[in-house]
Image (tube, rainbow, N blue to C red):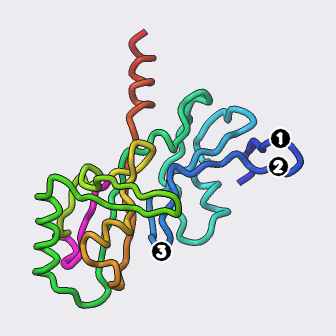
Amino acid sequence: ADLPILYSQGFNTRPRIQLATAVPLGVTSECEIVDVSLREVLPSLAGVAERLESVSPNGLRVYAVEDTPIDGPPLQKLVTSAEYRITPLEAVDEDALRERVASLLAAERIIKVKQTKRRKSSFDLRPLIHTLAFDEAQPGSLVAHVAAGERGSMRIEDLLTELGLQDAHVNVHRFRLHLDDYYARLRANRNEF
């Protein structure tokens, strides 16, 4: 795309590119957010999306290109939640799944115990599940809006286990990332002066 990408210093230089949050193994996505550091300010962002798409694999779309302050927080700190579509690829007992969804949403706490070599720890998954509902547009699919990012992340594997789908053949697709409104607040503050 012939952009002035900034590279790290040292013996093994690398482009300064960061993803907002990694996609779990086996999960597809249509909403990746990438932070690319440039050596210089571009005079205009017009045409940058098209330039990126022209050198990207077929099917990869660039929806928007935005300028962000160099001294702003990294993308990883701005991610607050993600939305996933979970579609069973084999027959499942939909009534039992509906009961499981209702049970999870009604629960005050969902305790997960994690055992490592040195210690056992437990944590509550319930605050990490914002919404969980059957997708009216795609019968048989669930839409899960869950916490993601530094303030707590719902692992999709844990959600599948709680739904009783840990051994089922399912398609999990992330279709939306939610970010803190840091940059919107920053722009609003600049416009006040």
Q: Which residue is mark 2?
A: 13
Instruction: Say if mark 2 contacts mark 1, CB within 8 Å.
Output: yes
Magenta segment boundaries in residue numbering: 137-146
Q: Which residue is mark 1?
A: 9
Residue shown at 32% from the left, 86% from the top: 89
Which type of secondary structure does the marked residue at label 3 adopt?
loop
Measured as percent of width and height from the top left, residue 49 is found at: 57, 51
Q: Amino acid at mark 3?
A: Gly
Q: Which residue is mark 3?
A: 26
Q: Amino acid at mark 2?
A: Thr
Quarter of the image containing the N terminus?
Answer: bottom right
Q: Is residue 47 left or right of residue 77?
A: right
The furthest residue to the right: 11
Q: Amino acid at mark 1?
A: Gln
Residue shown at 31% from the left, 72% from the top: 161
The furthest residue to the bottom: 91
Quarter of the image containing the C terminus?
Answer: top left
As measured in the structure, the alpha-carbon distance from the residue carrying label 3 to the one carrying label 2 is 30 Å
Q: Is residue 169 left or right of residue 105?
A: right
Which type of secondary structure does the marked residue at label 1 adopt?
loop
